[in-house]
Amino acid sequence: MKSLIDKVDYKINHIGSYKKDDVIFLLKDISQLIKEKGNKEREVAIQSGVHYSEMLPIEYKPSDRYIELFYKALEEFKKDIAIYVGVVSEMIIKNRGKDIVLVSLARAGTPVGILIKRYIKFKYNLDLPHYSISIIRGKGIDVNAIKYILLKHPHREIQFIDGWTGKGAINTELNKTCSELNEKMDIKLNSDLAVIADPGFLVKTFGTRKDFLIPSACLNSTVSGLVSRTVLRDDIIGEDDFHGAKFYKELINEDLSNYYIDKISEVYNKIVEDVKNQVKILENCNLEPTFVGLEDIKKIKNEFNIKDINFIKPGIGETTRVLLRRVPWKILIKKNAKNVGHIIQLAKEKNIQVVEYDLKSYESCGIIKSVEDK
């Protein structure tokens, strides 16, 4: 390994509402340094060339009906989620061994990383270190965070974790960044990305390839440790800083982050055989990515005359994000789609058109409105 850094005194300030035993955020607290912007204001800026990581959206305050849907989804799917967490955890141990560090990609990956950490502790009595770090499309991963982890755990390999795959933009960014760092620093980062749901067939380490509702996608910071999405801006993030995030301490009374984790992990003792059976099935399958989900994206791009492929956000998780923090144009829903009640509710609240569409890999897709459209 080439000279990794000149100094190792990175400041680790506790941020977020998760327990320290569950995760350590390698993020700079910028709560007093940045002010959120409305979705329309952000959308105009993004489509005018401002990078999305330089701004934060105003956190959506869910309606009572929407919160009801979250609780209902969690109760209905907690066992399924636990099974998929167990499956991806077993695949991680099988493929990477036990001498690893879990590294979640903030923020959607954080609750998934905690669930994986807890499952491995439950199943193997192994308390793996777990960090959450920033990766930003077009700008790469937080190099200072990677350096910190490598220095802290020099003999362990990193296993990257996210919540789900959309069309693969973050996975592509991760592969690119790891390749560059490996060459630059003479290290051997493995860019394998583990997710709960991989509907686009984009990764080889997953819990399921169904476009599945992960309830943590339904809310913003209140199910992600009260942490904002990550920020990278020259005026507030210095050369030796981690990427930034805001800590929404004022939302502590509405926080469901630990409740969500506890509700799923409490059923681990009931899903051991289910996980075992699912892993056996996967062991006899070809798990290599086929990128079949891109066919849906190409079709949507052509049929709706979408100029920028980044306006297309496929999958339940990404559709939810579009409704929560972007300006949607249309929402596409597969015929007889399951697990999309919260999406329909959000679209109704925001007066966004919902269209039934022949999707193959995904249950839904959000399309962002072009600011050029009247």
Image (spheres, rainbow, N blue to C red):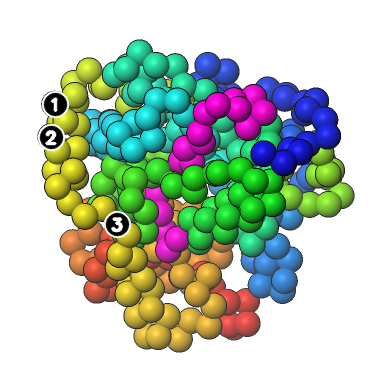
The image position of residue 328, as x and y in percent, is 50, 67
Residue at coordinates 80% horizontally, 25% vertically from top-left?
Answer: 9
265 left or right of 176 in image: left
Q: Is residue 249 visible?
A: no
Q: Which residue is mark 1?
A: 273
Mark before the other along the chain sequence, 3 or 2 = 2
* 216 within the magenta span: no
Residue at coordinates 36% horizontally, 71% vertically from top-left?
Answer: 294
- Out of 368 and 7, give the one closest to the viewer: 7
Q: Find residue 277 and name its label.
A: 2
Q: Disc 2 residue type?
A: Asn
Q: Disc 3 residue type?
A: Glu
Secondary structure type for disc 3:
loop
The image position of residue 101, as x and y in percent, is 50, 29
15 left or right of 350 in image: right
User: Which residues lie in the magenta part?
Assistant: 149-168
Q: Which residue is mark 3?
A: 288
What is the quadrant of residue 244 in the picture? top right
The image position of residue 228, as x and y in percent, is 63, 41
Mark before the other along the chain sequence, 1 or 3 = 1
What is the quadrant of residue 126 in the picture? top left
Q: Disc 1 residue type?
A: Glu
Question: Are dots 1 and 2 in contact, CB under 8 Å?
Answer: yes
Secondary structure type for disc 2:
helix
Q: Is residue 299 visible?
A: yes
Position above or below: 350 against 143:
below
Quarter of the image where the C terminus is located:
bottom right
Position above or below: 139 against 6:
below
* 166 within the magenta span: yes
